Amino acid sequence: MLDVIKQLLDKDLVTEDTRAAIQEAWDQKLAEVKEEAKTEVREEFASRYEHDKSVMVEATDRLVNEALQKEIAEFVEDKKQLAAQRVMYKRGVKPHMETLQKFVTRQLAQEMAELQADRKSMAEQIKTLEGFVTSSLAKELNEFETDKRSVVETRVKLVKEAKEKFAEIRNAFIKKASKIVEQVVSENITKEMTQFKDDIKTARENNFGRKIFEAYTSEYLTSYLHETSEIRKLQKQLDETTKQVEENEKLLESEKIEKHKIESRHRRDKVLNEMLGPLSGDKKEVMGNLLETVQTDNLKTAFTKYLPHVMKDAKKASIISESRTEKTGDKTQANTQAKEQDADVLSIRKLAGIN
């Protein structure tokens, strides 16, 4: 139909305006027909969609209901089986639980008993270790105290023996050296006297020449160099004054140092005299030798440390000398002597100003 109309329009049977009008009316009618066809197709598809939708919903609802009923039935069956299995499990596990509880209780009691035994054993071991450490420490402290006392006693003994030996060596040295010194002094005095005579002669000659030179120099300075000589004299006096001031400062400093030494020595001698005053004889000499190398501030501490041992040595000597003449057999005599010794030490400390 379209081809026929198109052939008619292509021929020269109609005008251009008519052809345009026909073409426009054709296009308009064609658009209306297409729109009507689309509307009909849409309505048809909508009705088909609704029909298919209802069919699918019914089929899905039926399928879901069937599957849900099947699953519910299976779930109910599983629940019944689970309840039965729980009952069977409880019946089967109950004897095992009792056995397990008994085993755990027995093992726990055994472990607690072993723990108590270990604690008791550990406590005994600690107690034994404490006793061993205490006894060892006490033994070491006693040995240390004994060694300390023996060291002090040995030092006192060595000082005393060294003093005696030194006195013997000093006497022998004095005897031997006196002879040598006497001979050397005699020879040197003879030689020095001869040299002294020669020096006196030379000094007299030099003094005579110096007097002649000084007389000539003073005459020359007075005659020719009066002004320069005055300046030189002033300069010389200034130099001598400066030198004298420096010497005075050095002398003052040395006097201060010497004064400090004298004061320190005086203070040390005073402290030593106060402490050694109650002692007498060998005890005083031994104690003085022991305190020679001790600083002044530490004299009282060293005196307190050495005093019992010095007095002990002296008491030993007196006891030995007395034991040769008197034996009473009385046991209380030793205690009396020890008390007298302690009383002597205390009285000496009080007299020395040491509490």
Image (tube, rainbow, N blue to C red):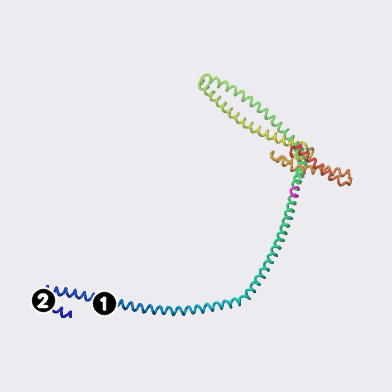
Residue 210 pos. (x, y %)? 59, 24
Amino acid type indicated by mark 1: Glu
Residue annotated with mark 2: 14
Q: Is residue 59 left or right of residue 250?
A: left
Q: CA distance from mark 1 to mark 2?
A: 36 Å
Residue 131 pos. (x, y %)? 73, 57
Residue 105 pos. (x, y %)? 66, 70
At a point 15% along the width and 75% down the height, the residue shown is: 22
- The residue mark sitting in front, 1 or 2, is 1
Q: Which residues are magenta?
A: 145-149
- Residue nearest the observer in this picture, 355 or 180: 355
Amino acid type indicated by mark 2: Val
At a point 63% along the width and 32% down the height, the residue shown is: 256
- Residue nearest the observer in this picture, 2 or 68: 68
* CA neighbours of label 2 inside 10 A, class few (<14), some (14 to 19), many (20+): few
**Among the 4 quarters of the image, the one containing residue 318:** top right
Residue annotated with mark 1: 40
> Which comes sooner in the sequence, label 1 or label 2?
2
Is the C terminus in the top left, top right, bottom left or bottom right quadrant?
A: top right
